[in-house]
Amino acid sequence: MSLKIALAQTNFLVGNIAANVENIISAAIYARDELHAELIVFPELSVIGYPAEDLLLRADFIAAANNAIYQLADVVTDIAVVVGFPELDGDKLYNSAVVLNNGVILAKYRKQALPNYGVFDEQRYFTGGDAPCVFEFNGSFIGLTICEDVWREGIIEASRQAGAEILLTLNASPFNSGKIHQRERVVCEQIKAAGIPLVYVNQIGGQDELIFDGASFVVDAQGEIVFRAAEFKEQISVVEFDGNQPIKAEFAPLYNEIACEYQALVLGIKDYVRKNGFQGAILGLSGGIDSALVLALAADALGADKVEAVLMPSRYTQDMSNEDAVLQAQTLGVKYHIIPIEPAVAAFTGMLADVFAGTSKDTTEENIQARCRGVILMAMSNKQGKLLLTTGNKSEMSVGYATLYGDMAGGFAPIKDVPKLLVYQLAHYRNSLSPVIPERVITRAPSAELAPDQKDEDSLPPYEMLDPILERYVELDQSAEDIIAAGFRREDVVRAISLVDRNEYKRRQSPPGIKITSRAFGRDRRYPITSGYRGVDQLDLPKC
């Protein structure tokens, strides 16, 4: 007895039910006619895309999604289709999977484990199911689960006890660095304990700040991976089962950690631009490492012909910054413009001269320069219909080393979740493929170039010290005392944490950016702007 199961690692657009249904139909026909599959499995909530957020609160949206299931049942024949959809039953909404075969609903399953941590808010929308689902198909008894179910103890075992000989799981598991290894380890351990094979189908694509990396896989009853689809690519593949056991097939290798992060960023830019209908992307190119990395990412994501760079030198911009920026733009084949900002800065400072009379120069004048650049870039973005990419990294966003309505102005922040030290690693990785970032950009000391001989370390601890402190405080929720006890200097910890705490208002006004770490700012880390808590307050408390 054999069975061919297709894994549809597909890229859906949240909310576009009609397009998603067409995608499902096309993939099912291809799997049936070209791969000779008998059953095809799609990702979690594939009819509406994931995550649909508060679209799930709209009655018209839910009605359209439920109607789409009957359309699929009527259209797709001679292959069983397993799709995810938001099932409305009375006044309750379920995150469900349905099995369609020749116009008949063979089975329906309601997700039991609803995640409500990190980027997930499923308990806001859904009611959890309370039972396993096993259906018979071509002589095999097949169980269904959805995403978080396979991370929770007992749900896989309950499916086995209900008679499942093969398990299918529909997933929309978002990417962060190292997630694929964690995902495979958890699933393999659970499957080894249960002793039944599993087909894991994961979504692919960018959705706002989230990336779905694909890497769908099949595990045999011994807990060994026998097939894996590619990361970061749409792919429809088929795995054959013989006697309810999967036959080992060729599978894609995994990227190393830095390459994986780079591919995630490329996919995030590509899908944000494509899905939101922009004509391309534009960014300010300073000759510094951050904008150099963003330019390389954008060119790789969209093609050089869809990207424009703008050099906006001031009196403080060094010649090497301009030279390196021009060199990179020419190397990548990207169109570039040089627009000096001195006339705009002079106009603003002249207009404010009477108001500022009797005061000393400070960061106000520096911020005027950054805001002049923001106005120029936003004007070009508006005129050309291209998305303005900001170039700030996670280290800067953490401590507020950025200017509101200046370098923070834009529509999308690709490296918002990329710490400064990782920026350098990604730049080295990109140059290992082909040298597109000038070496001097990587080796020179970072500077905002808003004042004479300015360097980042004039205002911040060295990034070699700052980034590990930020990781511990922002991503791991360690206290100031814990971080100091780990060997970091007290003054560096106090300074860094104080900056993080008082700059939440800036981060709340920043554009969305791609999540690649275990905890990104935004929906992943939600702190109040107005708060009496400070992360260093505990240092002043007496010890008990």
Image: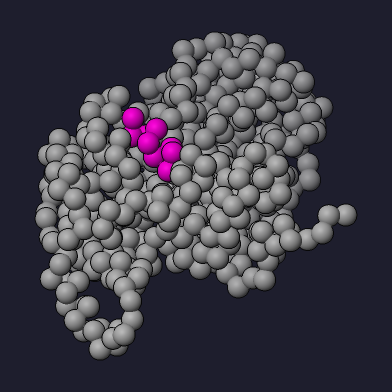
Q: Which percent across, then down, holds residue 457?
A: 41, 49
Using the image as rendered, state which of residue 226 and residue 45 is in the foreground: 226
Using the image as rendered, state which of residue 32 and residue 474 is in the foreground: 474
Q: Which percent across, then down, holds residue 4?
A: 53, 19
Q: In this view, does 310 lie above or below 36?
A: below
Residue located 31% across and 85% down the image: 358
From the viewer's perspective, tell me whether residue 399 is left or right of residue 246: left
User: In which quadrant is the C terminus drawn?
Assistant: bottom right
- Magenta: predominant secondary structure element? helix
Q: In this view, does 483 lie above or below 366?
A: above
Q: Can residue 249 be seen in this view?
A: yes
Q: Which percent across, then down, holds residue 18?
A: 41, 52
From the viewer's perspective, tell me whether residue 90 is left or right of residue 12: right
Residue located 59% across and 37% down the image: 170
Q: Can residue 278 be seen in this view?
A: no
The verdict on residue 426 being magenta is yes
Q: What stretch is highlighted in magenta?
A: 419-428
Residue located 30% across and 66% down the image: 366
Q: In this view, does 51 lie above or below 44?
A: below
Q: In which quarter of the image is residue 158?
A: top right
Q: In this view, does 80 lie above or below 398?
A: above
Q: Residue furthest bottom?
A: 354
Q: Which percent across, then down, holds residue 378?
A: 24, 65
User: In which quadrant is the N terminus drawn?
Assistant: top right
Residue located 78% across and 61% down the image: 541
